[in-house]
Image (cartoon, coloured by chain):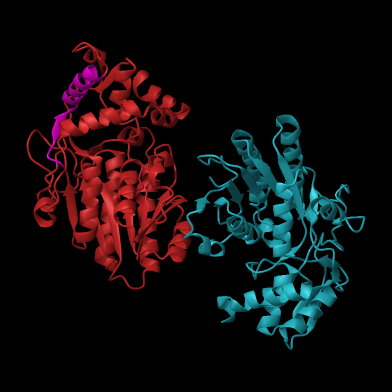
Amino acid sequence: MKKIIITGGAGFIGSHLVRLFVNKYPDYQIVNLDKLTYAGNLENLRDVEKSPNYKFVKGDITDSAFIHQLFEIQQFDGVIHLAAESHVDRSIMAPNEFIETNIVGTFNLLHAAKTIWKETSDKLFYHVSTDEVYGSLKETGFFVETTPYDPRSPYSASKASSDHIVRAFYHTYKLPVKISNCSNNYGPFQFPEKLLPLMIHNIKNNKPLPVYGQGLNIRDWLWVEDHASAIDVIFHQGKIGETYNIGGKNEWKNIDIVHLLCKIMDIKLNRAEGESAKLITFVKDRAGHDLRYAIDPTKLETELGWHPSLTFEVGLEKTVDWYLSNEEWLNHVTSGAYKNYYDNQYVKR
Amino acid sequence: MNKRVLITGAAGFIGSHLCDRFIKEGFDVIAMDNLLTGSLSNIEHLFPLKEFTFYHHDVSKFVHVPGQLDYILHFASPASPIDYLKMPIQTLKVGSLGTHNLLGLALAKKARILVASTSEVYGDPLIHPQTEDYWGNVNPVGPRGVYDEAKRFQEAITMAYRNFHGVETRMVRIFNTYGPRMRLHDGRALPAFIGQALRGENLTVFGDGSQTRSFCYIDDQVDGIYRLLLSDHSDPVNIGNPDEISLLDFAKEIIELTGTKSKLVFEPLPVDDPKQRQPDITKARKILGWEPKVNRRDGLRITIDFFKSLAEFQ
């Protein structure tokens, strides 16, 4: 039996990973450690919460004493670390928590693992990170695993720091680690501050669709369940000490995605073609907005045989369907605090 | 669907035993603790159960628990003088702000709440034994004031929530309780004596040892709390063991039960150390049909065995 702690398991990507592991590996004990910040929501995991191999623990990775005690009594065999503050806009407004959670929190987990794990041959510390650590691309080129780090927002800088600390624990203390850097994710259960759910929500409610700048920034989009399946493959088959880029070779300009969404939603909502697109409103660009991200996942595809399971058009339609049929979920997570955030970010700009 | 109970202070001595009891009774338990004085080792054995969930959280801050709650038991607080003297502000906050947060949660969830009060609300009592209608003799600015007054405020705000908001409230006034999972170094007489005896050191008696204590075994305490929660009685109820013993005789009893060759040494009495504390449990007997079942010598044997099993004595 393996006991694995997944941090940030109540978040967007984390909940998909928890679901995959709980269902696919009934002989693993999965402990989901989450602080339940605004972005963590146990409603994301209703379907697995009564599974005998699943356990939720509420806690904060910045609390080193607690993390140490938890590792001591639980004797985990593996760590999959996703807990992080992840929204770039929030990191621009208030970077403090990004430094605390993403850097100090990662260190606390590494330190606890290093201290508690006497014998490390069957242990693994898996760190989940982002392609934003590589900085911004021009019109051509791709991020590969050897691309030099060039983080440019407080968010990506905090993730880059955590990646470096994870590697330092591998090189210095021989802690068995793996790292993956993934492109933008989309799919069900994503908090509506992120581009896709925000646009879906606003299109549906005939609200303006705020697009930064001219919407020319390019992002590389991956179906969230494909990210989870990539983590699964790397966790089990990847090489210790290695880094893997995860992406679906699926680059889109923001404005093109918004138009595509409008087109899908026009059909779903029985609107005349082009009606939803009238809602598009350009707002002042994000400070230091990276132009383009694009992942080259060749290493993961050739060495470990992983491939994305569906095309963007299919995934996008599934996502729209999910948000349209889970209005209650959306209403629950968009509390008063979220409304204030939304106003500050888009309305008062 | 199982009834769902939130227990604060769940990694502490009494809280962890409450977790055991509620799990045994078929509840889903959400255990909350900030681990300031509690330890995860007390509830480690419950982690594998799907009915058990742990929330690492300080209840002095806003408390959020997703989903339905049927009962709340508020047992979070430093409770030993050495702890609350070290953490006076936290002690006052958990009794006041913490209680406020949990009463608010009880109101929001339409849950019944039981708050852990203490014989300390009687201070250095002028009547013996203490009945629930005795108002106490507390020095608000003395060293124990932070704990005593936090708990007195807790009772006041709990009554206010009952009277003003109609929250279903229960209050237990806990007298000295002992048993496994007590901390060896919590500064109280019982673990101090047992620790000294097991190390073969002399037992330190403060004053002339004529001050009395009464000790309730943990299983009895938990049973009293459990019955009170499920009763319809919202006024405070004493739960403790009226079997009174002087600290001098108690020290001798520990020497006898541990079989140590230790002797007694005497030191001056600390400020505000209560001279006598003995519960009147007439009310608990009548209302809850409860009374302690474990006699002191039996309880002490189990407790001594627990202390012997600690790493310190291996």
Q: Which corner quadrant of the image does residue A37 belong to? A: top left
Residue A291 in sight from this viewpoint: no
Magenta stretch, overall SS: helix
A245 shown above or below A111: above
- Magenta residues (range): A248-268
Q: Quadrant of the C terminus of chain B?
A: bottom right
Q: Is residue B67 left or right of residue B230?
A: left
Q: Is residue A101 magenta?
A: no
What color is chain B drawn in?
cyan
Q: Is residue B93 left or right of residue A147?
A: right
Q: Is residue A339 visible?
A: yes
Query: x, y (%) of residue B103?
Result: 65, 39
Q: Which residue does the image show at 55% across and 61% down from the upper left?
A: B43
| Colour of chain A in the image | red
Picture mark count = 0
Image position of B81 (left or right of A204): right
Q: Position of residue A29 (x, y in %)?
A: 38, 59
**Residue A348: percent from left, percent from top:** 37, 19
Q: Is residue A257 magenta?
A: yes
